[in-house]
Amino acid sequence: MGGPYATQNLEGGHPAFDVVFCGEAEHTWPEFLRDYRRGMHREIYTERTHPDITVLPPPRFDLMRHQHYLLGAMQVSRGCPYQCDFCSCTSLYGHTIRYKTDDQIVAELEQLHRLGYRSIFILDDNLVGDRGRAKSVLQVIRDWNDAKDEPAMFSTSASIDIAHPDLAILFAQARVTNVFVGIETPNTESLASARKYQNLGRDTVSEIRRLHAHGLDIAAGIMVGFDDDDRSIFRRQLEFLQAACTPVCFTGMMVAPDGTPLKERLIREGRYRANEAVGDHTLDTNVVPRLMSVEELRRGYFWLMNQLYDEANFLARVRGALRQFPAKPLQRSRFQPKEMLHPLLFLRIAGRLTRYYLLGGAELRRMFLRSLPLLWRYREHAATTLYWLIAFTHFRETLIRRGVYSRASTPTDQPLPERVTGRPASRGARGTARPRC
Ligand code: SF4
């Protein structure tokens, strides 16, 4: 076993695995193979340096079972120059960002395209960690894509530096149009105490709107439970996100991963809760917040999630984003995972989506019917709108399955309106129930 989890969770050992690789494995993997052939391999192989990735051979994508994958995936860089104290990227990959060469990038793109992938996820933690190099990488992707009869669409993660006008245009031209951006919080004290300095002193709402105006779908990475967050943060986050109009918001409670400065600080301050089952999937945290209790954080977080994925609030963000999107995009946005090209599968997905909304209750039905004119009016962005409607079902179902879906939930700074849009609370509701950069 290897990868981030193995690297950062060695304390308890990994008894279920014969061999564990800590750190990047470019040097330790050949070492293991040599030892294995001699019949004397170790249990743990540790790499403390950050290997040169410009000498890596192209991955053997041809060995994958493509029927199991909707998107292609590739890595262009490793590392990030920033110092956000909650982020494990830099303890894993270092502060010096390393990019592959143009030739490596084109070779991987060609291979994925030949295998049929038209939608590709660039798995980097922060594609724009070096703005100059990021520009030339985007130019390479743009030129490669422009020469294709069937160009590919890309998604990735980036810091707010993407808002630089030169970069935003290049992202659009290269068709890297679906971008997770680490926005985190509108609370500037929290940004400063978490050392997310690159997000300070900016008008983030205006910047997101400008990115939308380039046709970029910005997925907001959001967290609550920073040291300077009090019980008002949940409402502030909601108002901020409704103003920014980011339909998809990856929202989580603050968590301190192993190997991060945050975890060390929390241990020093006696605010670390030893708790393995943390994160967005467990709806729990290992952080004791400074200005509220863990229970208040959890309750406020559930309220925020319920509000963000309330039908009216979600549709308001969708409508707002579409209004900000360009009437004539630089590059046509097409969500086209290779299997979607198969008409039968496309019909199956469309049928399931329609059934979900039409049979899911009055609110879902109303939201779906109101989104149909948007699909027609903003037809240049119909694929993106459909993607948002699919994403909504994911978030809503996750809340229901986790048992925290409730239209009646209230945060800790009550009283609050049911919705920021001011619409009346619904009747007949259906049951009650984070990428880096
Ligand atoms: S959160 Fe993003 S910007 Fe901050 S260190 Fe991690 S990858 Fe870099």
Image (tube, rainbow, N blue to C red):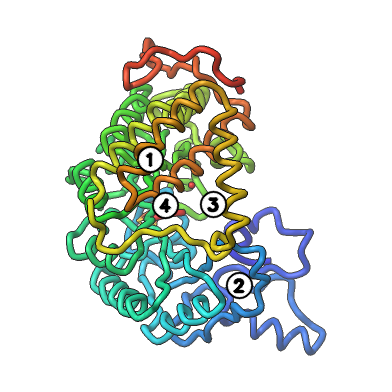
The answer to which of marks 2 and 1 sits earlier in the sequence is 2
Give percent across and percent down for residue 12. 70, 53
Question: Tag 4's secondary structure?
Answer: helix
Between label 4 and label 3, give the one nearer the viewer: 4
The answer to which of marks 4 and 2 sits earlier in the sequence is 2
**Which quadrant of the view contains residue 429?**
top right
Disc 2 marks a residue whose amino acid type is Thr
| Mark carried by residue 383 | 4
Question: Tag 3's secondary structure?
Answer: loop
Give percent across and percent down for residue 150. 42, 73
Marks 4 and 1, how far apart in space?
Answer: 14 Å
Marks 1 and 3, how far apart in space?
Answer: 31 Å
Mark 2 — residue?
A: 46
Marks 2 and 1, how far apart in space?
Answer: 41 Å
Mark 3 — residue?
A: 258
Q: Give neighbour class at mark 4: few <14, some 14-19, many 20+ (Cα, 10 Å).
A: some
**Which quadrant of the view contains residue 278?**
top right
Mark 1 — residue?
A: 247
Between label 1 and label 3, give the one nearer the viewer: 1
Viewed as shown, does residue 245 lie left or right of 392? left
The answer to which of marks 2 and 3 sits earlier in the sequence is 2
* 242 or 49, nearer to the observer: 242
